[in-house]
Image (tube, grey):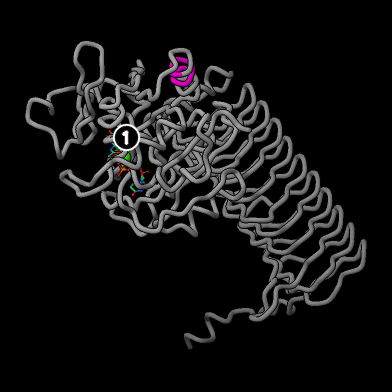
């Protein structure tokens, strides 16, 4: 039997977001809100997680995969109704943590403290609260002395109640049996005509159950994402935390104000990030690499001691001691081995470039294998697409491709082969051969004078 169960409410539409996407599918630092919350409860060591889904459930379920059990709330009748859907799947003796899928800044440590207090005191319910300078929109905690009297929603609150700055974070700990009993007794008699989860505190207190509050010291943790403004506010907080974390781990971030690093990025010691740089998704940078300025890397790996300057890369692997940029564009499936140089206005897609090869200027390399130490002259293009299919090009080790060569795929250029500048190569080139494909230069003397006559 599992003892600590998390129930995460994620069935709402998130009307205030004004979006096609269900609210919990919006991204914060490269990870959706629901994934943030699943990570938080995972770190808090819960034995089981249940997620209540409803609006846009297919998308939400795909994100959850098998990290939690899914429970469907077909009609979104309020937070109390949402938690009610989980009751058939819970046992009375369990401790139940209830959370919202729109609260991605909670700390696992805070959840642990909440559960500890709740269990040590033998409470029926414990509410996580916080002080907020601007409590607008949150449920207010009404107390008599230190004791909770009730929770009142913004829309139901009297003017003096709206002055209260202690708010309901929407995170609670319950004794399973007390939660079950109280949930059956809530009504829809409120400003929104919904089953409010918060009404169960009225029920519990009426039955003289022990109800506690536990206040977090950090109000940022309580930030609920109901609007795009709150999403941006959370992004700012998470971003600052991520930057501070990496700086404390020995990463130089020259200008934090213009640096954006997603939650799942991994950086090694002595990496330097120059201004106006974004590291997105599951990007990983090894020691001593210098990234930026003005660089955007998404799901990329960069080996030790490489430089990536003013460039864009996605789903690419960059080896050790590579020089990328300025103005390179590496697309999915690009794999660069150690000491590769990719220069200005070079686009590479679905290609493997072996150690020491150079593609310094103005090239398109697609569906290609470039051998070790090959040199690709300025303006070289692999013609990989015939309008229907993509074809492969192989360039051997140490091959020297002259400037402005068109390599029409499928094609193989042997090792140590040389292509003359300006050639359009359509047939395989043997190893060590020189191939030239262009018409002979014609010179007509005094051409200009003759025309004038
Ligand atoms: C709720 C609390 C409020 C608290 C605030 C903290 C209630 C009545 N109010 O208000 O006291 O201060 O959170 O952020 O609980 N959901 C469902 N099914 C539904 C309705 C909602 O799954 O039928 C989910 C939503 O997807 C969301 C969560 O429950 O993840 C909270 O709902 P939301 O509408 O955001 O509640 P708030 O108005 O923020
Ligand atoms: Ca909310």
Whether residue 310 is visible to the viewer of this picture, yes or no, is no
Q: In the displayed structure, does residue 208 sit left or right of residue 366? A: left
Which residue is located at x 84 percent, y 57 percent? 399
Give the labeled residue for mark 1: 233
Q: Which residues are magenta?
A: 113-118
Determine the residue located farthest toward the top in the rendered image: 145
Give the residue drawn at x 58%, y 53%.
Answer: 329
Above or below 88: residue 395: below
Question: Residue 306 location in percent, x, y?
Answer: 67, 35
Predominant SS of the magenta segment:
helix
Pinpoint residue 288: horizontal percent, then vertical percent: 66, 26
Residue 42 belongs to magenta span: no
Taking depth in this image into account, of 200 and 354 the one nearest to the observer is 200
Q: Position of residue 354 (x, y in %)?
A: 80, 49
- Residue at the image position 69 percent from the left and 59 percent from the top: 350
Foreground: 23 or 374?
Answer: 23
Which residue occupies the extreme right position in the image?
A: 431
Secondary structure at badge 1 equals helix
């Amino acid at each position: 039997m599992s003892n600590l169960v998390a129930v995460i409410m994620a069935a709402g539409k998130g009307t205030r977001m004004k979006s096609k996407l269900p609210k919990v599918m919006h991204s914060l630092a490269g990870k959706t809100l629901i994934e943030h919350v699943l990570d938080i409860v995972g770190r808090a060591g819960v034995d089981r997680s249940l997620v209540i889904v409803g609006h846009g459930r297919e998308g939400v379920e795909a994100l959850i995969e098998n990290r939690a059990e899914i429970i469907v709330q077909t009609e979104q009748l309020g937070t109390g109704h949402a938690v009610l859907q989980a009751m058939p799947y819970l046992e009375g003796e369990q401790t139940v943590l209830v959370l919202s899928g729109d609260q991605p800044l909670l700390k696992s440590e805070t959840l642990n403290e909440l559960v500890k207090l709740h269990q040590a005191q033998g409470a029926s319910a414990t509410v996580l609260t916080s002080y907020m300078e601007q409590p607008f929109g949150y449920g207010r905690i009404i107390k008599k002395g230190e004791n909770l009297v009730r929770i009142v929603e913004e829309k139901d609150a009297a003017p003096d109640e709206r002055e209260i700055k202690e708010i309901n974070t929407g995170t609670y700990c319950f004794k399973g049996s007390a939660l079950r009993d109280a949930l059956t007794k809530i009504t829809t008699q409120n400003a929104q005509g919904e089953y409010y989860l918060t009404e169960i505190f009225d029920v519990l207190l009426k039955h003289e159950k022990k109800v506690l509050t536990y206040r977090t010291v950090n109000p940022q943790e309580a930030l609920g994402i109901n609007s795009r403004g709150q999403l941006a506010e959370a992004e700012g907080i998470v971003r600052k935390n991520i930057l501070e974390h990496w700086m404390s781990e020995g990463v130089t971030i020259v200008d934090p104000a213009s640096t954006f690093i997603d939650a799942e990025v991994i950086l090694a010691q002595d990496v330097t990030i120059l201004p106006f740089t974004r590291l997105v998704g599951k990007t990983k940078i090894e020691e001593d690499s210098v990234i930026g300025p003005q660089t955007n890397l998404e799901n990329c790996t960069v080996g030790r001691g490489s430089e990536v300057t003013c460039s864009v890369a996605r789903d690419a692997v960059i080896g050790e001691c590579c020089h990328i940029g300025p103005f390179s564009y590496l697309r999915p499936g690009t794999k660069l081995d150690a000491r590769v140089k990719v220069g200005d206005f070079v686009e590479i897609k679905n290609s493997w470039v072996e150690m020491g090869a150079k593609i310094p200027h103005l090239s398109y390399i697609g569906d290609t294998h470039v051998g070790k130490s090959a040199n690709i002259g300025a303006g070289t293009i692999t013609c990989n697409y015939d309008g229907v299919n993509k074809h492969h090009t192989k360039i051997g080790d140490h091959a020297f491709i002259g400037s402005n060569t068109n390599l029409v795929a499928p094609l193989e250029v042997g090792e140590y082969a040389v292509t003359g500048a300006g050639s359009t190569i359509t047939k395989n080139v043997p190893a060590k051969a020189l191939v030239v494909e262009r018409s002979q230069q014609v010179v007509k003397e005094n051409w200009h004078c003759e025309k004038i006559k």
